[in-house]
Structures are given as structure tokens and as C-alpha cells.
Amino acid sequence: MKRIYMDHSATTPTDPQVVEAMLPYFTDKFGNASSLHSFGQEAAESLEKSRQQVADLIAAKPGEIVFTSGGTESDNLAIKGIAYQNSKRGKHIITSTIEHPAVLNTCAYLEKAGFEVTYVPVDIDGILDVAELENAIRDDTILITVMHANNEIGTIQPISDISKISKEKGIYFHTDAVQSVGKIPVDVKELGIDLLSISSHKIHGPKGIGALYIKKGTCIQAIAHGGEHEGRLRAGTENIPGIVGFAKATTLAKESLEVDSKRLTELRDLLIKKVLDSIEYSYLNGHPTKRLPNNANLRFSFVEGEAMLLSLDMKGIAVSTASACSSKSLEPSHVLKAIGLRPEDAYGSLRISLGKNNTCEEVDYVVESLIDVVAKLRDMSPLV
């Protein structure tokens, strides 16, 4: 049976070159980067070299990179760290209705702690209204956190426009760029970002490692306490094998970004066109062009997404119905609800996220399989 993986927004296979780079740091180069002897200094040297490599991917300075356990921790550190450090100045935060659970649940936690959060809606394509965001700003607003690209529908937000407003108002701006970094160009200086979250396993690096970019001069507080690691912002012995692997993944992503982005965009558009042309009552969720090059979120009337997912899995195809972080929930996707879909339409949606190793032949097989699966499920549906 074929095995075709098209769920790269959930996670990616670790690149063999990344694994090769990591291996010595489990055995030969196992020192603690805080130790003063040669084993420790060897690890410390690799740590700082890796920090430079990660910084290079987003045009940051190495001293602005703090290593974390991944995107979720980076989001927590950014949002809670800014909130706690700046609470005397204000307790108001602005975000969007389609953020990742790592942001939404962190904001909900802060609401219980006395902060106020405004959730700015998005349009049918999933794009935030910048004017509405600006109208939501108050004298006590201390942070705006809006994701760069959505993890479910792939829509890319007008980050530069938001950053201009935040600068004019003297408000910190954080963006969750877990899905965009390594897929589209991200320059923190050009975008005008104060804090940016990255995750290794979305770009063919290992799981359990990520980073938070913190612009120099940003007033932020640590949320985990212990040693003086990572500029006293993230206590705990650094995961050197993971950091080295992450750094290698960022280097590979930077080298192939332009070529991969072009190829994935062509493959994505081919997939979308073939599905929409071949299957009646099928639709694209999200903006048709302002979207990640590898993301196709499609909905099919009169069928249920989980049934499609399981049927495709039996044909050796891996896709998803929503974010992997909320896929076990019985509720329809909060993102699809936020763009105005009815529950039955949200339930009938699939996220197909391509990777650098997918081929045109695999796209053809997936489309053929979808045609077959949708037809069979509709035959059994009482709604048709």
C-alpha cells in the first residue's frame, strides 16, 4: 500500500542531514554548556554557533534568540513575559479569533489573572481587519499578538501593517510564526516585530526544540525560574542535540526556501484546481493567494471530515481535519467557525499540507482517492 504524508503543518520528517548533525552530541560531545571544562566549552561553542544559524534565518542578531522547547513555550514566554513585566503600565492585550491554542489558551489564562483580552474577528478568508484592530487599542494596551500565517487555513496576515500601528502606539507586537518561518521569507527587521515564535519540527528539525526572537530592548520577564541560562529568560540546561538539529534545519530551509516555496506553490495550486474541478460542491477555505505555499484547506458538502480522513488513511494517505493540537476535540474548528462557516461545513473540511518531498504523482493519487472517497461517503449520506 502507498504511504503518502500530506500533514506537514502538524509535523515534518526530520531531515537525514539534521539527524547526522545531532548524533555526536548524544555521545561524544555531551557536555553541559554551562560547565567550565573543555567538554562544557565545546557544547557552549556549538550552542552559540547554532544561535547564529537560527538568527540568520529571520535576519535577527544571535543575542536576540532564546531557545525554548517549541512553539507553545515560545508563545507562553512572549505573552506572559510581556504581560507580567508591563502590568503596571496596563493589562490589555489584543489578539485575533483564529490564533493557535497556544496563544488563545495563554490569553484565557491571563484573563483569569486580571488581564483583559480583545479578540479581533477575521473576514471570510481569515484575514484580520487592521482598522478594527486599531480601533481596539486602548491607553492600557500593552501587547498585540497576531499569528503570521494560520496553521489550519494557511492565510497570511498583514503583519507589517499591524507592526506599524503597534510602533506608533508604543505597544509590543508578538507574532506566532511557527507555520511561516522556513516556508516564506521572514525578516524581523523589515516586518517590525518585537517577538516571534519558531518551532523546529515544522521545518524538518527535531521535536521538543524551538526559539523565541526577542528584539533587543524589549522588556520581558522570565516565566520559569532556575539557573541563568538563555540570558536568564529560560532556565534549564540547554538541549544541545536538539538545538544543533534545529540550527541545521534552519540552514537547510534558508538554502532551499526560494526553490521549495515556488515548487510547493505550484503543487498546491495543482491540487486545489484538480479537486475543485473534479468534485462537485467542493470549496477552498482561506484566501486563494495570500496563503502558505504548502497549504490547501478544502471543504466538501454532505460529508464529514473525520470519515474522509479515515477513508484516506486506509488508502495510505495522511491528512488532517484541523490543527493537530486540537484534532481530538469534538468541537468544530474554531478557525473555520471564525471565518463564518456553519458547523456542518466546518466538519466537512480537510487540511492537506504538502512537504518538500511530495510529488505531482502523489497529488494525482490523492485527488483520485478523494474523488472515490467523497462519492462513496455521499452515497451513504442522508443529506444528499
Image: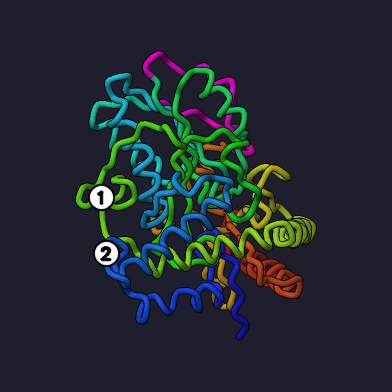
Whole-number angstrom distance, CA of label 1 to CA of label 2: 15 Å
Using the rendered view, name the quadrant where residue 339 is placed.
top right
From the top left corner, tell me how far across and down residue 61 is, in percent. Answer: 51, 45
Q: Is residue 252 left or right of residue 80?
A: right
Q: Which labelled disc corresponds to residue 306? A: none
Vertically, is 300 above or below 45? above
Viewer-closest of 241 and 260:
241
The amino acid sitting under disc 1 is Glu
The residue mark sitting in front, 1 or 2, is: 2
Q: Which residue is mark 2?
A: 36
Instruction: Examine the rendering and report whether any part of residue 279 can be seen.
Output: no
- What is the magenta range? 118-140
Q: Which residue is mark 1?
A: 228
Q: Residue furthest bottom?
A: 1
Which residue does the image show at 41% across and 63% down from the upper left?
A: 45
One can see residue 27 in this view: yes
Vertical relation: 1 (above or below) 266 = below
Q: Secondary structure at mark 2?
A: loop
Seen in the image, is 81 located left or right of residue 207? left
**Pointer 2 local density, CA inside 10 Å: few below 14, some 14–19, many at least 20:** few
Hey, what amino acid is under mark 2? Answer: Leu
Q: Residues within 10 Å of mark 1 (few under 14, many from 20)?
A: few
Local secondary structure at mark 1: loop
The residue that appears at 40% across and 49% down in the rendered structure is 66
Residue 378 x %, y %: 63, 62
Question: Which residue occupies 34% across, 40% down?
Answer: 106
* Magenta highlight on residue 362: no
Quarter holding residue 46: bottom left
Q: Is residue 252 above or below residue 114?
A: below
- The answer to if 134 sits in the magenta stretch is yes
